[in-house]
Image (cartoon, rainbow, N blue to C red):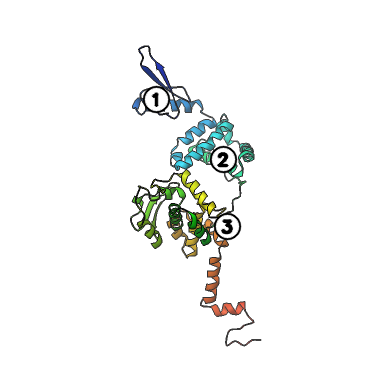
Amino acid sequence: MRVRLKGVNTVRRRRKDGSVAVYRYHRATGHPLEGEPGSPEFLASMHEAEKLQLSRHDGTVIGLIRRFTLSDAFACKAEATQREYRRILTKVEREFGDMPIAALDDPRVRQELLAWRAKVAEVSGLREADNCLSIVSSMLSWARESGDLLHNHVIGFKRLYKNNRADALWQPDHIKAFCAVAPVELQRALMLALHTGQRQGDILALTWTNYDGHYITFRQGKTGVRVEIPCTTELKRMLDGLPKTASVILTTKTGRPWTAFHFRHAWKAAALKAGIDGLHFHDLRGTAVTRLAEAGCTLPEIAAITGHSLRSVNAIIEKYLSRTRHLADQAISRLENGQRSDFANTLQNPANPVKGRKSK
């Protein structure tokens, strides 16, 4: 079986004696690679080729991108984040690859980058355009920290895409409609999301070793934050009743782990069948934060469950809670039943004075 090695050109030549000779070359530089893939000789050759590739682009944006993607800061990012960064940085290479790094310290580069974003927006939309500039800004901030640049001239840029999802909450009616038509495998994912407030990728990756019968403990893939979530009675009942057909907790109907692609499409189909439009799986994370806040949880308590920073939790609460009726009902109830409710009622309704007070 032949395996295609990434970044490697493989050439086969038949010798006069009938045997086949295999030659391998580093695709970007043409540098010959010694030994068999995985051997010390092969790895050493690959290392030399990568050094040649970096030196070839020294002092240019392409060289900066290569160094950034080989840095520890990049390696610490989640795998999905790395793929997205590489996708966008490929676009940056095509547009600015030959630009000298020194030009990035010139304040005028901001206008060039904003003009490029405008071109991306025309072709791919505002959200993609903002995403491109955000990743460029992340790389420039790294370059400033590493000493390659003095400034990041696009940091704090004003975004074009406005996404107000303050109304994007899964209400009880949505959950009831979804569960009425969705396969039980998706209902289990819904339950985990609502009761833990975790991202889709982390929920699908949960294994039985992460659950000890009372707590779900794991390290988030995107942030690296370790969370220890006590299970609600309802969630514990569901988990204890699940068949353990795989190492992961959530599986398809055939007992196999979900792929991100399969799950995303299955979820979308179930939501459409339920008549749910404009709500995504990720909105369950904000819904979970909102439910915890409505239950009276403090910011640190919510952050301990979801893994958000305190700042992020506060931002979510400011966005979502203003749109929920539950807290307004709680506030009026406390006003009417507080220790000084007589005084409050008197102020609100002077036409009906408190007993014992003479009306004028």
Q: Name the amino acid, label 2.
A: Cys
Q: CA distance from mark 3 to mark 2?
A: 27 Å
Give the tally of numbered discs. 3
Residue 188 appears left or right of 96: left
Check disc 2 and report the residue beneath it.
Answer: 132
Check disc 1 and report the residue beneath it.
Answer: 45
Q: CA distance from mark 1 to mark 2?
A: 34 Å
Q: Nearer the viewer, residue 153 or 28?
A: 28
- Secondary structure at badge 2 equals helix
The picture quadrant where one finds residue 184 is bottom left
Mark 3 or mark 1, earlier in chain = 1
Q: Quadrant of the C terminus?
A: bottom right
The residue depicted at 39 percent of the width and 25 percent of the height is: 45
Check disc 3 and report the residue beneath it.
Answer: 167
Q: Quadrant of the N terminus?
A: top left
The picture quadrant where one finds residue 350 is bottom right
Q: Nearer the viewer, residue 159 or 104?
A: 159
Disc 2 crowd, CA 10 A, few/some/many (<14, 14-19, 20+): many
Q: Name the amino acid, label 1.
A: Ser
